[in-house]
Amino acid sequence: MSRRVISILIFFLIAPLILSAANPSELEQQIERVRRERETLVEEQKKLQTELEEINKESQTLGSAVKSLDATKKKLAKDISITQSKITSTGLLIQSLENAMSEKEKQIITHRTAIASAILALSEYDTNPLILQILASVRLSDLWRDGSQLAGLNARLEEEINALRETRKILDQEKAEKEKIKKEQLNLRGQLSGQKSVVEENQKAKAKLLAETKNKEVEYQRLIQANMARQKESEADLYRLEQELRITLDLSLFPEPKRGVLTWPLDNVYITGHFGRSDCGIYGGADCFHNGTDFRASMGTPVRSMLAGVIEGIGNTDNQRGCYSYGRWVLIKHDNGLTSIYAHLSASLVQKGQKVTTGQIIGYSGGVPGANGSGYSKGQHLHVGLFASQGVEIRQFTTSIGCKQVFVPIAKGRDAYLDPLAYLPVL
């Protein structure tokens, strides 16, 4: 084998294999600029959230309701900007990864070219008998030099093969990271779509509220009272059906009450209504029964799944005029025998049959009286309910007075309702 061939092989094998990183690239500068802009937006969002919480602490009057809707609209607009910023940042990260992966592919080609050339040269060299190699050499020292170079080349070849394997491993890891980021981007786009729909519902809610009340406090209070009266009718219908469907629960099919089995459905927790008869002074007369836990949550607050599971169903009882039940709801069946419901939503982000993870955003809170999806509600909040899975089913509410056309989760007896706070973390 000639010295020229060996020199060519050595050139291939010592070619640069690592990206140079002297100065930050334009792409990195863009990522940093988007990050700083998002930090500014987050600070503004926090201020708007504080303002919104202060407004919602006021008494439930028409003035405070309109102010809350206006503040919510501003906050949602900021939420949309932040989400769009995250999408942009994710896109830039994906582009950066694609650039790195492209460079890795070039490195792999360089490795393969060098290895192929080396194998070909070694193959040609090894096919010549030793006597021919001696006769072909001008000097015996040239033969030994070539042999020594080939020995070193063989060792270098082993190193390059190992480097190729390591490069492939790094490439596979980067591909996995890229897929993860793309999935995150799809989730962000879903959130952005949900936030936009909440802004639209917010605008409709304000217009409808002012139209129905003619901007008069007395009309607003009358609207609240009418809503509560419809709630009592709906609860009476529900109670009658629950008694008809009543079953005996198998206690071994769902966990005993234990704090921390579930996670909080909101980032900021403030309980406004408790499970059972303890809040009957708020929710109705002597026969009332509150089948879940209520949380203070302004319209558009992200609602999270309390535990991983599968979306058993979604719906909106407001789709039938005169039906004032859960409003827009999401039902999640969990693997441990529990099923959770999230009601009075302004928007949902999930579909039936979809798998969700613990803490995943599934929708946005609502509850503005008269707004689509609010159901029976006297103010912005989130209603969370919990069932023994064996004791709940989604069925058409044909026996009700005002909800004959809608499908809704129905408990098979009141024993099927469980206290969410018994499974949620300690405050």
Image (cartoon, rainbow, N blue to C red):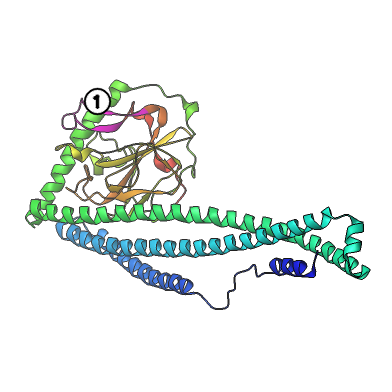
Decide if residue 166 is on the left or right side of residue 204: right
Residue farthest left in this picture? 214
Q: Where, by quadrant of the figure, is residue 351 drawn?
A: top left
Decide if residue 111 is on the left or right side of residue 64: right
Membership of 407 in magenta stretch? yes
- Three-letter code, disc 1: Arg
Decide if residue 426 is on the left or right side of residue 414: right
Q: Nearer the viewer, residue 324 or 31?
A: 31
In this picture, is 32 found above or below 286? below
Instruction: Please name the residue that numbered disc 1 is placed on.
Output: 240
Percent across and percent down for residue 288 are 26, 35
Percent across and percent down for residue 199 are 24, 57
Membership of 340 in magenta stretch? no
Q: Where, by quadrant of the figure, is residue 409 drawn?
A: top left
* Range of magenta residues: 392-409
Q: Nearer the viewer, residue 310 or 300?
A: 310
